[in-house]
Image (cartoon, grey):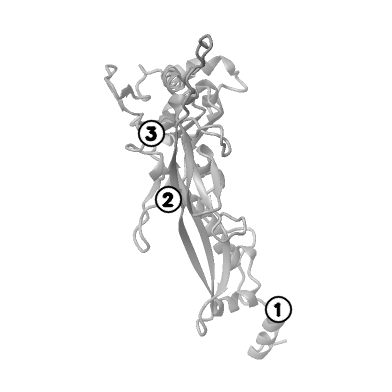
Amino acid sequence: MKRTAASIQADIKKGAFRPHTALSNVALAYFQSDAKAFAKTIFPICPVNLSSDNYYIFAKEDLLRDNWHRKPAYGKVDPAVLSEYTDSYACQVDQMIMGIDRIRETDQKRRQGPATKDSRMQRTRTMAGQANIHMDVMFARSFFKSGVWGNEEKGVDSTTVTSGQFIKFSNGNSDPVAFIDEKKTNMEENTGRMPNRIAIGVNVFNALKKHPAILERVKYGGSTANPATVTENVLAQLFGVERLSVQRSIMNTAELGQAANMKYIGDPNGFLLAYATNTPSIEEPSAGYIFTWDMLGDGNIMPVLNYDGESGTHSEFIEGLMATDMKKTADDLAMYFSDAV
């Protein structure tokens, strides 16, 4: 039977004919794995009911002082002092919007295209992926760079170091495990808290995997069938921390229309040693918190909404919202090390 324009159009309307198809099992989409997002792996998220408010800080000096004294006969000791003061957070709302052209969508629906081309799913997935990128960018700017923390040291090639310096881990004469142990001990002595988190840049991780002092400690744990390898878990055990995170997420720093400029978000040559809680606490300090405000009051810290465009535009929009404040809450509970390689 010879096909005519009218018969083809009739089959299209019935969904029995697809003038153009695409593979349903293959698509090229450079979504990053959610496992690469590092912002939420170091400091805990603290949900808040108000966009800005205060929180209490109880003086470390008073809490860690021995305030017990011998009671004098017929008398009493002076009351102990527990100083307190407040600091504040302020969550600012960030937004992302993506549009859908409904006229263009007509072809897609009639072609019965694959799920990979579903515009709503596509844009929602894109928005979620870029939310991770945005969080990592804010984390890097707030915590993972020079000039943020009071305790900071810079790596040097020389084996003769002065105050504020350390031997780069790319130098075989360094001993990363002994160095981290020393810094952990210093922090514990000054705060009563042993650091339990390390965030490291990619280049630092690569240098540690082949460092003689690291390999010497793990080489006897391997065999011909299962050779010893230096993984994130191995490094976490060697350094004696609960969590070690490698800052692997990337982003394109170029503007729309410019040539792509792909870079790691976190400083690939730096690392952060810190103490943090797993969840918000009123009896534990934490070097930092990610305050998140539920701005719509529905318990969702990143709501994704759908709404129609203006009349005549034949469009709809997908909108995402988030409101966070990445706040340094205890400066003495973190140390940043730049130029580690």
Occupied quadrant, residue 283: top right
Q: Residue at x 58, y 17 (%)?
A: 221
Bin the neighbour count of mark 2 within 10 Å (Cα to Cα): few under 14, some 14-19, many 20 and up: some
Give the CA distance from mark 1 to mark 3. Answer: 57 Å
Residue 251 at x, y = what percent?
A: 42, 50
Q: Residue at x 64, y 58 (%)?
A: 25
Using the image as rendered, state which of residue 306 and residue 187 is in the foreground.
Answer: 187
Q: Which residue is mark 2?
A: 251
Question: Which circle marks residue 270 in the picture?
Answer: 3
Q: Would residue 181 appear left or right of 306 to someone viewing this image?
A: left
Question: Which circle marks residue 91 in the picture?
Answer: none
Instruction: Give, as a three-letter code, the residue at label 2.
Output: Met
Q: Which residue is mark 1?
A: 15
Which callout, 3 or 2, points at the residue further toward the start of the chain?
A: 2
Determine whether the residue tagged by mark 3 lies in a helix, strand or loop.
loop
Which callout, 1 or 2, points at the residue further toward the start of the chain?
A: 1
Instruction: Give, as a three-letter code, the residue at label 1.
Output: Gly
Determine whether the residue tagged by mark 2 lies in a helix, strand or loop.
strand
Quadrant where the N terminus lies? bottom right
Q: Residue furthest front?
A: 74
Q: Residue at x 57, y 60 (%)?
A: 303
Using the image as rendered, state which of residue 262 and residue 87 is in the foreground.
Answer: 87
Q: Is residue 293 above or below residue 278?
A: below
Using the image as rendered, state which of residue 69 and residue 109 is in the foreground.
Answer: 69
- The answer to whether residue 229 is visible is no
Quadrant where the C terminus lies? top left
Q: Residue furthest top?
A: 73
Residue 96 at x, y = what percent?
A: 48, 62
